[in-house]
Amino acid sequence: MALKQALDQLHKVLGNQFTIAKSELDLHGRSESYFPMTPPDAVVYPESRADVEKIVEICAIHDLPVIGWGAGTSLEGHGLALRGGVVVDFTRMNKVLQINAADMTVTVQPGVTREALNQELRATGLFFPVDPGANATLGGMAMTRASGTTTVRYGTMRDNVLGLVAVLADGRVIRTGSQARKSAAGYDLTALFVGSEGTLGLVTELTLRLHGIPEATSAGICAFPDMKSAVNTVMETIQMGIPMARMEFTCADTARAFSDYAGLEMQEAPHLLVEFNGSPEAVKQDAERFAEIVEDNGGSEFRWSTREEERKALWAMRHNGYYAILATRPGARAIVTDICVPISKLAQAVDETRADIAASTITGPILGHVGDGNFHTILLVDPDNPDDMHEAKRLSDQMAFRALRLGGTCTGEHGIGMGKLGFMRTEHGAGWDVMGSLKMTLDPQNIMNPGKLVPGPLLH
Amino acid sequence: MALKQALDQLHKVLGNQFTIAKSELDLHGRSESYFPMTPPDAVVYPESRADVEKIVEICAIHDLPVIGWGAGTSLEGHGLALRGGVVVDFTRMNKVLQINAADMTVTVQPGVTREALNQELRATGLFFPVDPGANATLGGMAMTRASGTTTVRYGTMRDNVLGLVAVLADGRVIRTGSQARKSAAGYDLTALFVGSEGTLGLVTELTLRLHGIPEATSAGICAFPDMKSAVNTVMETIQMGIPMARMEFTCADTARAFSDYAGLEMQEAPHLLVEFNGSPEAVKQDAERFAEIVEDNGGSEFRWSTREEERKALWAMRHNGYYAILATRPGARAIVTDICVPISKLAQAVDETRADIAASTITGPILGHVGDGNFHTILLVDPDNPDDMHEAKRLSDQMAFRALRLGGTCTGEHGIGMGKLGFMRTEHGAGWDVMGSLKMTLDPQNIMNPGKLVPGPLLH
C-alpha cells in the first residue's frame, strides 16, 4: 500500500500533471531497442523545478524509483522502470530560458530538443552543434554524454555543457559550473553529472556553449579500396591540422544499402563523408588539401561542393543510413552497437568486426564517426527469432570486448543504461566500484534510476 | 609516537627515497605565494606506482596526511602540509612512458614537466599545448586544472587529459578513461580527478591529448582606447569563428611596465596580443580579418608577423610580464589574483578592478587570457608590511566576490588550495557540501591533502 499512498500523494500534488493511464505507462515502458516492455507505475509531467523537487521528495519518502525521460530515443534502455516507480517526463519543461549571444551560451530546460533549440537560435548566427542524429532532448543528451557526427570538431556533451542545476535524491538543489568559460574552483560536478544517466539526480536546467554558424561549408564524399586506406586518410588529415567539421565512414555494405535506398551510384566500397567549416577560402583550401591526402592513399576522386543543396543531400543520406540499412531486410529490427577505439586501431576493429559478421548468421552494415574512432554496426534481426537475437548479442559482446582489448571503450556515445552493464567491470575495474560509492553517497536509497550504470549490489 | 613509528616504517621501506633533512622539509614547506612556511614531517621520492602504493598504505595505517608535490609552482598553497604529514615529491617519476603519434596521445608519469614533454615530442611534429607559464609538472597541472595562454584554442587540462591512474586512500588503484577519444561509459572519473588538487588520491600516470604543430603561425599586437573596445574586438573575433591560438590582454599599467622593462615603445593603453595557427594562407587571412575588426573598434594598427623571432619576442615579453611588473616596485612581492567572468562582463570587471586598485594604497597591473574571460592582477606588496598585505587581501576578496556576482568563478586556473576556500560556499552553495561528501567517500580518514578544496568540518 506504500505504492498506492505514494501515487495518491503525487496525484494530489500534481493534479493533471500525473497519470496512470495504461497508454501513457506503455508509452514510457518502451525503448527504441530490444529490451522488453517495462511500464512504470506512474508518469509525471513537471513544469518547473519546484515540481521536480516535490516529486523527488514524495518518491524519497516512499522509497519509489524516479526515472528521467526526455524524447525516449535512448538505445540502451536508460528510461525503463526496472523496479517500477515514477517516470518523470520533461516534455513540458521545454523552454529556452536565456540566450546570451555575447557570451555564446544558452540556458535551457532539459526538455528542449536540439532541433527546437537550433530553431530558436536562427536569428542569432549561433548554433548548438552536438548532433546524435535523433531529435533528442538536451537533458537526455547531457545524461548520456551524447555526441555524433560533429564531435570531431565541436566535442561531445562533456565539452558543451558549461553548467547545470540538479535536484538530488535528498532534495538538495545544486547549481554546478558558472557562466564563465572555464574554472579551477573545486571538483568538476558538471562533468560528474554529464553522462550520469539520471542516477545521481534530475537535471532541471542546463547552460550550453554555442558556436558561430560557419561562414562557409564544403562537403564531399570519396571511396577507398579498403578500410586501412580510409583510416590512414583520416589520421593524416587530423595530423596536418586540417579542421574537419564532420568525418563519417561507411563500409561497403552500407554504401550498397545507401545506393539501393536512395537510387545513388555508390561503389560497393568503404567511403568517407567529410565536411569542412570556415571562411569561403578556408573551406575550399581544406577540401583541396584533403583531396590530395585521399589521392595519396589510393582513394577515388574526392567529389565536393560548397552548395547547400548538395551538402544537405549528403547528410540526409547519412542520417537516413539507419533506415537505408533497415530496408535491406524488410521486417527486421535493428540492434545498434557502439564501440569506440583509438583511431590507430580503427581499421583493425572494423575489419575484424566485418569478418565476425560475415561468419555469423545475420547481417550488420557498419557506419560511424571515424574522426573519433567510434563506429556502429546495425545488426538486423527478426525480434521473434531467438537465434537471431542470440547471434546479435554474441556479436555485440564480441565487439565490446574487442574494443576493450584495443584500448577503447564499450560505448562511444550511447551510454550504459542496462544494455552495457556487463562490460563495466572489464572496462573500469575498481573504478566501477568507485562509481558505485559515489552513487551511494548521493543516493543512498538508490531511488535515482536504479539498475543503470553502477554495480549490481545496488540493484537490490 | 605514532608519527615516529610511521616515519620509521616509511624510512625502512623507502631507504634513500625518504628524508627528514631540514633543508628538504623547508624546501617543501614554502610556496610561491604569501602563505607562511609549513614544513611537512617528511619528504618521500617515489620512483614507481608501487612506491606510491606503499607510501599511501603506511600513511593510512598511521593516519598521516599525504600531500602530492610537483614543481612547487602552485600559487594557492596546494602543496603545504597544513596538518603535517608526508610530502610526496614526484620529481623522480618523470618518464614519458609512451608516445602514440598515430593516435596523438602520450602517457607520462606525473613528474614530467610540460617543457620536458615538449622537448621529448620534438621529432614527432606533435606538441602538448597547455601552457600555464611556469614549467609546472603535468601531474600538478592536472591536479589544479591548469590552463593558460593557449586555452582559447586548445582547452584546459580538463580537455587534454584523456585518462589517468590514481592510488586511492584505501590503497585501491583505479585507471580512468581509455585510449579512445571519447566514451559514454559511466561517470567521468577522469574529470572528477582533474582539478581535485590531490584530495581524492595520488595520480601516478596520465594519458594526454597531443596536437599537431601548426604549419604556420602569425602573431601581433595592437592598442585600444579602452578595455571595452578591446573586449568587443575579442567577442567579434570569436563570433566570426576566426580561430585564435592565443588572445591575451594587458592593461595600460602593464603596457608601461613592459615598455620600461624591455625598452619597448608601447602606448600606455590596453593592448591585445594575438596569435593564429594554421596553414600559411589561413594565418595570413586570419590576421587580416582580425586587423579589420580591430580597426572597426577604434584600435591602433595591428602589427603582425609570421616570422618566428618576432613571435618569440612577443610571447617572451608576455611570459616575462610577471617580472616586468615586479620590477616596477623593487623589493616587492606579488600576490596574483585569478578571476574568470563571462566575456560580456570582462570590460566591466577589469574597469571596476582598476578603479578599486587606483583607490587603494598599492599598485596592481592587470594581464590575462581575454579569450577565456580570465584575468590576473599582480598586486605588489611589501610582505613585511601588514597594511600592504591587508590591502591586497581586501582587493583580492573584492575581485573574487565581483566575479561571482557577474556569473563567473573565483579562480580561472590557479585552483582553490587553501587560498580560495573562503569563496567556495558563495560560488557553489550546496554543491560544496556535495564535494565534501565525495571527498569523504573516497577518503574517509581525510589523509589526502587535508585542509584544501573541501568544506571545513573535514579539517578536524
Image (cartoon, coloured by chain):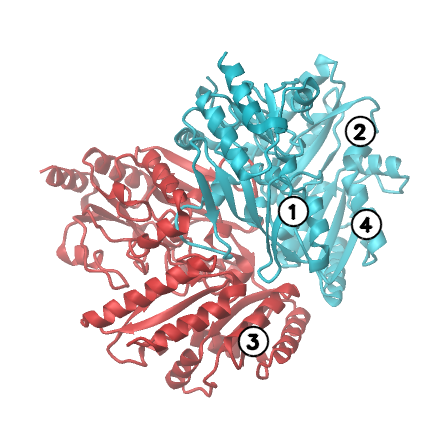
Chain colours: A cyan, B red
Q: Chain of mark 3?
A: B
Q: Residue under circle 1?
A: A130
Residue A37: x and y, percent?
A: 66, 18
Q: If the image is split into quadrants, where does the N terminus of chain B sit?
A: top left
- Rounded to the nearest whole Å, what is the CA distance between mark 2 and mark 3? 56 Å
- Between disc 1 and disc 2, whose residue precedes? 1
Q: Residue under circle 2?
A: A326
The amino acid pointed to by label 3 is Ser
Q: For this view, does B345 lie left or right of residue A250?
A: left
Q: Residue under circle 4?
A: A312
The amino acid pointed to by label 4 is Lys
Number of the front mark, 4 or 2:
4
Q: Are marks 1 and 3 on the same chain?
A: no
Q: Are marks 1 and 3 in contact (CB under 8 Å)?
A: no
Q: Residue under circle 3?
A: B229
Q: Residue at x 58, y 79 (%)?
A: B304
- Rounded to the nearest whole Å, what is the CA distance between mark 4 and mark 3? 39 Å
- Between disc 4 and disc 2, whose residue precedes? 4
Secondary structure found at label 2: helix
Residue B318, image quadrant: bottom left
Q: Are marks 1 and 4 on the same chain?
A: yes
Q: For this view, does B277 lie left or right of residue B316?
A: right
- Rounded to the nearest whole Å, what is the CA distance between mark 1 and mark 2? 25 Å
- In this rendering, is residue B460 above or below A284? above
Does the rendering let one see residue B163? no
Q: Chain of mark 1?
A: A
- Rounded to the nearest whole Å, what is the CA distance between mark 4 and mark 2? 21 Å
